[in-house]
Image (tube, grey):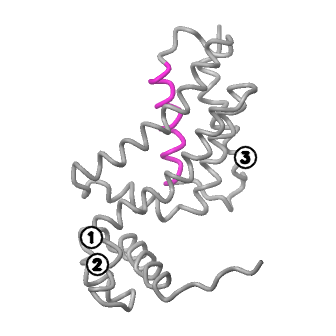
Amino acid sequence: MSRQARSPADDTRTNLLNAALRLFGERGYHATSLQDVIHAAGCSKGAFYHYFDSKEDLLLLFHDTFIDHLLEYAERMARESGDPLERLLAILRHHLESMSTFHDHMAVFHNEARFLTHAKFRLVQVKRDRYEAAVRSLVQEAQARGLLRADLDAKLFSLAVLGVFNWAFRWYRPDGPLPPDEMAASLFHMVVEGGRPR
């Protein structure tokens, strides 16, 4: 079956998102006006408000685009059976691999998240909490199986692991000397070895 043709409306929304992503990355969120985005997208203010309520909605959508992608995979891995540390490594490998596809989304959000209102940031936090919970469930399962020390604070350990991988977007390049799977395994080994039973 052939794909349905994209409508002009789809193209307008995509153009707005692409323009905002580029401008926020180049100038920053605060220095980019709504009119800048509209002009770069080649559309009208009315077209913008047909899809979005505010410039802030764009920033939130950039976050949701990459976190939804990560979250769906992480929660699926948390539900599966098998070695919990292998499943945790799979989540973190997927995290690194996703940086190639969503690098601009992640960079813009991390750099500009401070401009979100409290209400919008709460929506961000709900999804981030779910992602951390999926990781923590595997840490706790590994503890129950004796693969990690029982005295570890599972939440703190999960946040430490995620901190290492979240920060990697600032320096990791998928086209560098180590492919994502090898880099993920190396970082995972460094962090997880500290949690192994003595």
For marks 2 and 3, the one nearer the N-term is 2
Residue at mark 2 to residue at mark 3: CA–CA distance: 42 Å
Residue for badge 2: 49
Contact check, label 2 and label 3, Cβ < 8 Å: no
Element type at mark 1 = loop
Would residue 79 be found to the left or right of residue 152 on screen? right
| The disc label shown at residue 24, or none | none
Amino acid of disc 3? Asp
Give the residue number, with chain letter if any, for mark 3: 181
- Residue 72 counted in the magenta span: no
For the record, the magenta segment spans 154-170
Label 3 and label 1: CA atoms lie apart by: 40 Å
Q: Secondary structure at mark 2?
A: helix
Q: Position of residue 33 (x, y in %)?
A: 24, 78
In percent of width and height, residue 38 lies at 32, 85
**The N terminus is located in which quarter?**
bottom right
